[in-house]
Image: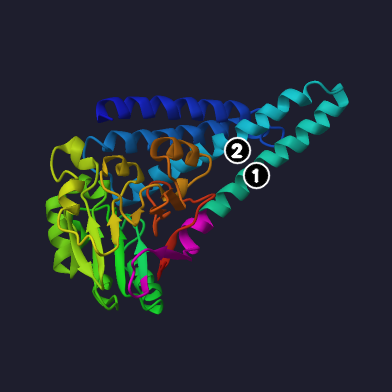
Amino acid sequence: MSPYIFIPLSTLIFLGINLYTYKRLKQNLILVKFKWSLRVVFGLIFLFEVAYFISIKSSPLPSLIYQISIICIGVSFMLFCTILPFHLVLYFIKKLKKNSQKIAKFILDICVILGFALYIIIGAYNANFNTIITEYNVKIKNLKNPMNLVVISDVHIGEFFQKDYMKSLVDKINLLNPDALLIVGDLVDLNSDELGDFLDPLKDVKSRFGTFMVVGNHEYYHGIEGLIDKFKSIGIKVLENESVVIADINLAGVYDMAGLKMDKFKPDFTKAMSDIDPNLPTILLTHQPRSLSYLQNSVDLAISGHTHGGQIFPFSILVWLNQKYIYGLYNITDDMKLLVSSGAGLWGPPFRVGSNSEIVYLKLLGD
C-alpha cells in the first residue's frame, strides 16, 4: 500500500478507535471521575500515533519517541479489543431491571479494567520474557541421514531488541547443537550503518554446516544491498534465488515478495530450483507463506516466517486472511510440508497475545 494512502487511512482508523474507547471509558462507573484525565491521556496517545505514521514517509523518530509511539498503537488496539466485547454484553444488561442493571454495569466496568490489565501484562510478558523452543519431528523422503536444524525468523533487531537479545538467542541456539542455523528473513529493522555490532553474536553460532538465510520484506525497507553485504561479512550464507547442498539435502532460498513491488531483488523460484539435485530432498526458505503460490515445483519442506503467529490476537485473523498459513506445520500435499514460525522477535507494539517468540528446533528424519 502506498504511504500516501496508508498514512491518512491509519490515522483515521486510530482516531476512530481512540474516540470509541474514550467514549466508553468515560461512562465507566470506576473511571467516571477521571474524564478530564482520560481526555488528556487519549489526546497524547493519538499525538504519538500520528507522529509515528507521519515518520513513515518523513525522517525517523528519535528512539524514545518511536518506542512510546509504537507502544501507544498497541495500547489503543488492545484497549479497543478489550472494550468491544464488553460493550456487546452491555446490550443484554440493558434488558435487566433497573437495580440489576446498575450492579451488572458496575461488575462489567470492573471486568473491563481487569481484562485490559491482564491483556497488557500477558502481552508484554510473552513479547519480552518468554522466548520458547518449539520442536518438530519431520519425516523427509529419501533423507539419507537425520539432521537437526534450528530455525529463527523475524528477529527485527532494531529499536527494541539489540545486541544483548541477539546474544541470548545465540546462547539458546548453541545449546541445541544444530547441524545448521536457518534464518528466514526480517532479521533486522535498521540499515547497515546503524546496526553497528548488534549482529556480532551470530559469529559465535556453533553448527556443522554454518548459517544460511533469506531476506524478508523489512530488509528492503532499510537498504537491502548494504544489509546483504553486512550479513555476508559476519559469515552468513545469503541464499539469493539459489540453492546449495548441505549433508545430502538441497537447501534453496529466494528473495522476498517485497522485491516485486520495489522492482529489485525479485524472487525467482525457477532460478532457485534450477540447480537442485533431483535425487536429494529439497528444503526451501521463503519469507512469506503466500509466496508459495509462485512455486511451480514441489519441495519436501518449505520454511517461512513473516506472520509472527498473528502476534496480538485478534489481529491474527487479518494475518490469516492475508497469508492463509499463519503458524505451525502444514501438509500442503502428500509430498510437501510447510513450516511457519511465529518468529524470534517482534515488530511494532512490544506485545504478544496468542503467540510466542520462538526458536524452532527442527529434527529431520528419514521416511
Q: Which mark is residue 191?
A: none
Residue type for callout 2: Thr
Q: Is residue 217 left or right of residue 128?
A: left
Placement of the N terminus among the 4 image quadrants: top left
Q: Secondary structure at mark 1?
A: helix
Q: Position of residue 151 (x, y in %)?
A: 36, 63
Residue type for callout 1: Gly
In the image, the segment drawn in magenta is: 124-148
Above or below 199: residue 47: above
Q: Position of residue 211 (x, y in %)?
A: 25, 69
Please report the residue visible at 39 percent of the width from the left and 40 percent of the height from the top. Answer: 323
Do the residues under discs 2 and 1 have CB atoms within 8 angstroms? yes
Give the labeled residue for mark 2.
82
Q: Is residue 12 left or right of residue 90?
A: left
Placement of the C terminus among the 4 image quadrants: bottom left
Q: Is residue 95 visible?
A: yes
| Front one among 9 and 154 | 154
Give the labeled residue for mark 1.
115
Q: Is residue 107 left or right of residue 152?
A: right
Q: Position of residue 174 (x, y in %)?
A: 36, 77
Please report the residue visible at 26 percent of the width from the left and 50 percent of the height from the top. Answer: 216
Q: Position of residue 355 (x, y in %)?
A: 50, 52
Residue 11 magenta-highlighted? no
